[in-house]
Amino acid sequence: MDVVIKNFESFFGEHGRHYSEFYVGIATDPKSTLFERHAVNEINDAWIHSTNAFASSVVRAAEKFFLDKGARGGEGGGDNNTCYIYAYKITPSTRQ
């Protein structure tokens, strides 16, 4: 989990000042979730997802870590096969 936290903390630091500026979630297909469900613009918006699959418990713990810090989103998504975490900077054109 430490690798995920470190990478996402770096992303948040580069693109904002407050956790509340970001949405964090978990998914089995993070790109589809980012670009279709949340309407994140792949080229112009700030987004990140884990590139390695992790155990569901790891991504859920990382998601909870960021939600507890103030990021937007909600726990309980996905299923036992959910193995990626993602985040994006919220803009007027993205959907939470």
Image (cartoon, helix red, strand yellow):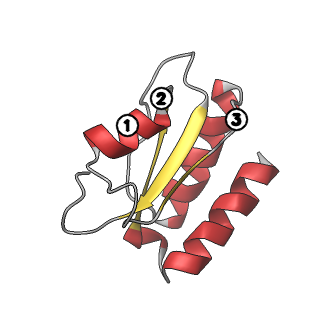
Name the residue carrying label 2: 29
Quadrant hosting residue 83: top right
User: For the residue marked with disc 2, what is the amino acid?
Assistant: Asp
Q: Which residue lies furthest to the left in this view?
A: 92
Counting from the top left corner in percent of width and height, residue 67 is at 49, 55
Counting from the top left corner in percent of width and height, residue 76 is at 43, 31
Callout 2 touching callout 1 (CB < 8 Å): yes
Q: Distance between the residues labelled 2 and 1?
A: 6 Å
Counting from the top left corner in percent of width and height, residue 82 is at 55, 24
Quadrant hosting residue 77: top left
Whether 84 is drawn above or below 1: the answer is above
Q: With 29 as the anchor, is 40 left or right in this view?
A: left
Q: Residue at x 47, y 29 (%)?
A: 29
User: For the residue marked with disc 3, what is the amino acid?
Assistant: Val
Q: With 54 as the anchor, is 25 left or right in this view?
A: left
Q: Which residue lies furthest to the right in this view?
A: 2
Callout 3 touching callout 2 (CB < 8 Å): no
Name the residue carrying label 3: 58
- Mark 1 crowd level (few <14, some 14–19, many ≥20, 10 Å Cα): some
Q: Distance between the residues labelled 3 and 2?
A: 16 Å
User: For the residue marked with disc 1, what is the amino acid?
Assistant: Thr
| Dot 3 or dot 1, earlier in sequence | 1
